[in-house]
Amino acid sequence: MTVKQFFKSTTFKCLVTLLSILLVCGIFLTIMHGLLEVTAEEKLSRAISKIYGKNVTTEISEVKNKELDLATIEEAYCVTSEGGNFLVKSTGKGGFAGTVTCWVVVEIKDNKISGVGKVAIDSYVGETQMAEIKQSFLDSFGEKYTDGIYYTTDDGFKVSSSTKSSNAICNAVNGALQYVKTEKLGMETNDKFKDFLHTEFINKKSTTFKMAANGGVTYNITTAGYGLASSSTIEITVSKDKIITAYKVTADGSTDGYSLKADIKNGVPFIGKNLADITAILGEGLEYPGDDMNTAVNTGASNTTYDCYTAAVFALANFDIALANIDVFENFEHLKFINKSKSKFTVNEDLSVTYALVTAGYGLASSSTIEITVSKDKIITAYKVTADGSTDGYSLKADIKNGVPFIGKNLADITAILGEGLEYPGDDMNTAVNTGASNTTYDCYTAAVFALANYDNCVPAESEGGKAQ
Amino acid sequence: MNKFKKITLDGLIFQNPTFILVLGTCPTLGLINSAFSSMGMGLTVLVILTLSNVLISLLRKLIPNEVRIPCYIVIIATLVTFARMFLDKFLPDLYESLGGFLALIVVNCIILGRAEAFANKHTVLESAVDGVSQGLGFTLALTIMGVICEFFGKGSLFGFAIMDFKIAMLATPAGAFLVYGISIAVFVYVVDGVQRMLRVKTNKLARENMLKEAA
Amino acid sequence: MGTFIAIVLAAVLTNNFITAKTYGICPFLGVSKKTSSAAGMGVAVTLVMVIATLVTYPIYTYVMIPLKIEFLEIIFFIFIIASLVQMLEKIIQKISPSLYGAMGIYLPLITTNCAVLGVTELVIGDMSGILAEGAAMNIGWAVLYALFAGVGFTLVMVIMSGMREKLNCYKMPKAIAGFPIAMVTACFICMAFMVFSYISL
């Protein structure tokens, strides 16, 4: 076949027709694609109508810090017609192989977050189980709002067979809440685990730590729950030498049908170990070692066992920072009278408590430093002002400096002098505090009240019982 | 005019694509658990079918016989892609409810079947009428079955809840098969009965005429 | 391994193309009067599904997405499938005339079979409920899914043809003979397959 023949043949005709039709169709569709592409504004108005079911007026709200720990804040709007609620488009991290982008309505009342109005899914990348995410799951965010963060495991925000995607949605909601809290309401994120390491292993909301009797730190850790396992609750005490001295699993988060070995529940593999020992078992990256037969965590409840190991790592690694962050005066009364960060107390052998208080300093007076000892019977046995905070030209009477009006008194005696409200009685001549250095004297009285009133807080009931035996 | 009447009646009844020809079964069975989506599918097919009939009828003298099928497929695929963009832009609810079946309109036998059996042999106007009537026949059939399945299977109509009683099986593929099968049987029975009656009537008339002539 | 089992179970039983997704109904109703032809059609569909996925999945992932022409997916896919079917027909005719005799006649019908286009569209979309957690979509899983979706299709085709062969022995009124009774039969097969939806992956 010559070239000429080819151009006249049916084959050529067929090819030309087919290709030209293809070309025309392709060009038509490309133009239409350009014309009909769904724009971002349309997506917003669709999201709004999906969420509110009506038109609302919105104002774009600035996002300064887009990248949060848990989520990326894409856009945010202040819904002016709905009482200033915020509509946040947030992309939650920690999905299965990607992220989930959600619209979250954060409800505001009296300049505070009052709840999560609605959560709607905008789009997702790399997720494969999104059909498992039902509307009821999205609604549960509003229903179960508590001030704080949502956790996939213990708050029931985990959809079985789509755990990772539900985690990403949770993170998106948390991110939106954090954004509104920090950027819009100017609130500090009150995070007691701010500089802690390995916080991903624990549930920040339920985990607490306090001073242990041996000068170490006792943690009450609620774990994050690895893989299929739910949260476990573990009590760990780390001594001053950074060694675990007590370890007890109080709630086993294993899936139905599995449970932790008794050894692990009682902390046998952990007690007496330091951070290096535990890290050596898990390896540098602290990764889940898999369900292999040859690893320490394989116990039939491997996920929970891994949780127990990571909880131990958390407790050991954060010993210093936890010790520094312990609020010894938690739950104490009359804290306004003293300077929390400078005051200290110790519990003596005979169950008396010795305070070294730095007062807040009333009125014109500066802080005074006072040493007070309260006996087991809640009576002041020693009282000494070591630094007089009186203004220049005034000073405490020697009697008061040596605690003469306080020694041998109980709380009722002192309160009787000051009156029920413990108010400053004024500069009147007829009151006990009028001594020429009335403000400082009042300080001394309130310090005595503080010492007496908080005796029970210093000496927990259980250790008293322990001594009695 | 008689010609168009015949085309219309064929599309709606005697050559009904759903009940008589049994074409386009996949979207039918997949979507009749909801009246809204089945009607939406019917109307989408109606529009695409009419447009493809018109286009193919216009191009029927240009397209060589050897490559006609690929050409038809490209034209239909273009229309479906366009429909998809259009629905995504203007009717997102319908777009979501049709799901994967929207793309599968490309391989809906009704459209290719009408292109092959009708549009490439008839004028543009005839093809357009054929497209509309076949599309309407398809839409009506789907909507009727959609209403039955949704009413009994979900206790609702076009998404509005009506009653608590429901036979959940009718909203599954199994129920779709059952309703579709019974609908065909009823349709065929009724159409056959009507045709027989008409035939009897014409026969009777003819006989009376013959008798009259004989007399 | 878990993903493998999940895909096989989903494709063959729980998400069967005919009984759960209602894809590929035309050949299911049209070519299921005899077991031999049903099996032939099933094998031909499986073959085309696998080859089509093998071609379209990489083209979509590595060509169309980078070029941002995803919107042309329908044209590309249907064109690829149509050409593949044509090529396959010619190749089978050349290599094995006996095989061509057995399933060659079904091949041209497959171009307009929604099961083939359906599987190529499915594997590029959301694979919820099919792919187990812990695995990302890739060409291997896509082809495996296509293969077993074809196997599931063939299975139901063969079951259906067996029942229809038996049904042929009975006389029935004109209105329910043919498609209506076939659909009622299909209804029972679907109900039987619903049992598999209790398999949780």
Image (tube, rainbow, N blue to C red):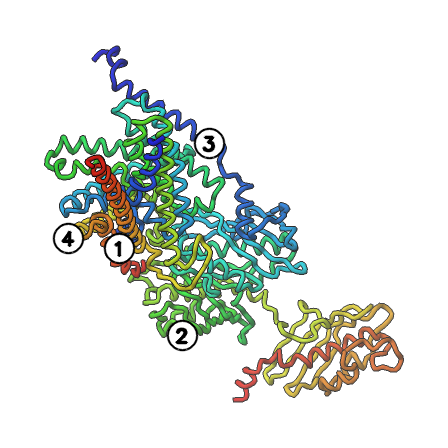
Tag 1 secondary structure: helix
- Residue marked by disc 3: A32
At which x and y percent is residue B177?
Answer: 29, 52
Q: Residue B136's x, y, as percent?
A: 38, 40
- Asked whether, in this view, residue A165 is left or right of residue B201, the answer is right
Q: Secondary structure at mark 3?
A: helix
Residue C27, percent across and down? 23, 43
Q: Amino acid at mark 4?
A: Lys
Report in which chain the residue with disc 1 lies.
C
Can you identify the residue that label 1 sits on?
C187
Number of the front mark, 3 or 2: 3
Is mark 3 in CB contact (under 8 Å) with mark 2? no
Sequence-first tag of 3 and 2: 3
Marks 3, 4: nearer the viewer: 4
Residue at x 61% of width, y 69% of height: A327
Q: As displayed, is residue B178 above or below residue A331?
A: above
What residue did someone put label 4 on?
C171
Q: Counting residues from the N terminus, which is met first, the one under dot 4 or under dot 1?
A: 4
**Whether labels 1 and 2 share one chain:** no
Label 4 lies in what chain?
Answer: C
Q: Marks 1 and 2, Cα distance to the nearest angstrom? A: 58 Å
Name the front one of labels 1 and 2: 1
Q: Residues within 10 Å of mark 2 (few under 14, many from 20)?
A: some
SS at badge 2: loop
Residue under the point 46% across and 64% down: A156
Residue highlighted by disc 2: A266
